[in-house]
Image (cartoon, rainbow, N blue to C red):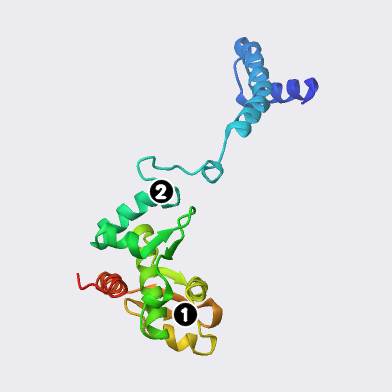
C-alpha cells in the first residue's frame, strides 16, 4: 500500500472515531502502525495456515500395516486367528515377499475333482486374507490365477466350480466378481479345508 493511502486511511479512522484533539496525534500514529502491519500479518497467516487435509495422516506406530509383516509374522497371526496349528499352515500355504498368499501343495492334493480343488483354493486363500489382513473380499482373478497354477482351471466350467465354496459367497458379475467371507462360517470352513488337503481330521 502506498504511503499516501496509509496516511489517508489512518486520518479517516481518527476522524471517524471523533476523538478529542489532544489525543488525535497519538491515535493517528497508532492507526498508521496498525494499517501498515495488517498486510504483513495476513502474509504470515497465509503461509502458516495449513488445512487439516494437507497434513500427513497420523499413523499409530503400535499398529504396523500388515503389508510390512514378514512371512513368519503372517504365519503367527494366521495360526492365532484361525486356531490352526502353524506347522499345518506352513505345509498348506506360503507367502510371496509382498505378502500375497498361495497354496503350497500340488493340485492333485487339493481334491478328487476339479470342483473340490478350486473350492479348496477359494476357501483357503479367502481364509488367509481374512485372518491375516482382515480382508473380507477376494477378487475372482486371484482364484483364477491360482487355479491355473495348480492345473485346476476349466474355463468352461469355472463359474460352476466356484459357486458353492465353503465359507464364502460370490457377488458381482463377470470378471468383476468377488468372494465375500461369511464371517460366521469361515472358521470351520478354513479348518476343514486345511485338514482335507493334508489328509487329516484335526
Q: Quadrant of residue 23?
A: top right
Residue 131 visible from this viewpoint: no
For residue 41, what is the image quadrant?
Answer: top right
Q: What is the crowding at mark 1: few (fewer than 14 residues within 10 Å), some, or many (at least 20)? A: many
The residue sitting at 36% across, 70% down in the picture is 124
Residue linked to disc 2: 70
Residue at the extreme top: 22
Looking at the rendered image, the disc whose residue lies closer to the viewer, 2 or 1, is 1
- Give coordinates of residue 22: x percent, y percent: 61, 9
Residue that appears at 44% across and 70% down = 138
Drawn side of residue 106 relative to residue 23, left or right: left
Check the picture and name the quadrant holding the N terminus: top right
Residue 113, image x and y in percent? Answer: 39, 86
44 versus 20 height, above or below? below
Residue 60 vs 179, above or below: the answer is above
**Res. 76 visible in picture:** yes
Q: Position of residue 24 (x, y in %)?
A: 64, 14
Do callouts 2 and 1 mark residues in contact (Cβ within 8 Å)?
A: no
Decide: is 189 above or below 50: below
Q: Is residue 142 left or right of residue 88?
A: right
Is 85 displayed left or right of 18 in the figure? left
The quarter in which the C terminus is drawn is: bottom left
Mark count: 2
Residue where numbered disc 1 is placed: 152
Please, is residue 66 above or below residue 111 in the view?
Answer: above
Question: SS at mark 1?
Answer: loop
Amino acid at each position: 500500500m502506498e504511503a499516501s493511502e496509509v496516511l489517508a486511511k489512518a486520518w479517516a479512522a481518527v476522524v471517524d472515531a471523533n476523538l478529542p484533539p489532544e489525543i488525535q496525534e497519538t491515535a493517528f500514529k497508532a492507526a498508521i502502525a496498525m494499517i501498515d502491519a495488517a498486510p504483513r500479518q495476513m502474509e504470515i497467516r497465509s503461509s502458516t495456515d495449513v488445512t487439516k487435509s494437507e497434513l500427513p495422516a497420523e499413523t499409530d506406530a503400535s499398529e504396523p500395516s500388515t503389508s510390512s509383516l514378514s512371512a513368519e509374522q503372517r504365519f503367527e497371526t494366521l495360526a492365532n486367528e484361525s486356531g490352526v496349528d502353524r506347522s499345518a499352515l506352513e505345509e498348506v500355504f506360503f507367502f510371496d515377499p509382498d505378502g500375497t498368499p498361495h497354496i503350497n501343495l500340488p493340485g492333485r492334493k487339493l481334491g478328487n475333482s476339479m470342483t473340490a480343488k478350486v473350492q479348496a483354493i477359494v476357501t483357503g486363500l479367502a481364509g488367509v486374507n481374512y485372518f491375516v489382513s482382515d480382508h473380507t473380499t477376494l477378487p475372482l482373478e486371484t482364484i483364477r490365477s491360482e487355479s491355473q497354477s495348480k492345473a485346476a482351471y476349466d474355463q468352461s466350467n469355472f463359474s460352476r466350480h466356484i459357486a458353492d465354496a465353503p465359507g464364502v459367497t460370490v457377488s458381482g458379475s463377470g470378471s468383476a466378481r468377488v468372494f465375500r467371507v461369511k464371517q460366521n462360517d469361515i472358521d470351520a470352513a478354513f479348518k476343514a479345508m486345511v485338514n482335507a488337503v493334508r489328509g487329516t481330521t484335526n
